[in-house]
Amino acid sequence: MHNRWAVPVLAELDRTGGTRFVTLCHGTGAGGESIRRALAGLIERGLVARNPGYGHPLRPEYVLTPAGAAVAPACAALLEELRSLGIGDIGLNKWSIPVLAALAVDRRFSELRSALPGVSPRALTLALKGLAEAGVVERTVLASYPPRTVYRLADRARSLTPALERIAEAA
């Protein structure tokens, strides 16, 4: 789930048990187009569905599917952990959560690119730089020839691992 708003949308739907589009916008603090894209991706992945028996067709309600209900509590726990670490904004950047999940084991840049299909080198560089500045990713340059750079989760970010693993299992 590399859409910035996918995790907050799932967490909000978990909290409310299903809600309308406008309420999702207000509950997550995201704009309409961002929520539309997140919902389209979540519907495509089978995690969210429109509630067919609810209200006016132009104001649909969105609910979690059984697959979404399995992953949504982990999304809520992940958001809470990001907030407790003080990195809520950086942690919700487009590629931050996938990068954090991929760093369950130490990896080099090229290994991260292979593990994250669709990420551009620039996007990965920006995500790693932001996460390193936030203190949740450590960058180590090994004294070898040629020099190698290895990325790993910082000790303070290890609390994110259980929620990231539950999301990866359910998604």
Image (cartoon, rainbow, N blue to C red):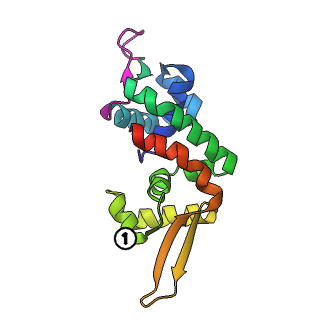
Q: Quadrant of residue 130?
A: bottom right
**Whole-percent x, y for residue 84 in the image:** 69, 46
Please tell me which residue is depicted at 53% across the width and 43% down the height of the picture: 163
Q: How far across and down, in percent of the image, does residue 64 sit?
A: 43, 24
Residue 51 within the magenta-colored segment of the rendering = yes
Please count the marks in the image.
1
* Residue found at the far bottom of this picture: 145
Residue 83 highlighted magenta (yes or no): no
Q: What amino acid type is highlighted by mark number 1?
A: Ser
- In which quadrant of the rendered image does the C terminus lie? top left
- The residue singled out by tag 1 in the image is 110
Q: Position of residue 9 (x, y in %)?
A: 49, 33
Vertical order, 23 against 137 (above or below) = above
Q: Nearer the viewer, residue 140 or 33?
A: 140
Q: Is residue 98 left or right of residue 81?
A: left
The image quadrant that residue 78 belongs to is top right
Most common SS among magenta residues: loop
Q: Residue at x 57, y 25 (%)?
A: 15
- Rendered location of residue 10, percent (x, y): 48, 32
Q: Residue at x 47, y 24 (%)?
A: 21
Helix, strand or loop under label 1: helix
Residue under the point 51% across and 19% down: 17
Rendered view: 105 above or below 26: below
Q: Is residue 97 above or below residue 42?
A: below
Can see residue 81?
A: yes
Magenta span: 44-59
How packed mark 1 is, by other alpha carbons closer than 10 Å (few <14, some 14-19, many 20 or more), is few
Nearest the viewer among 10 and 144 is 144
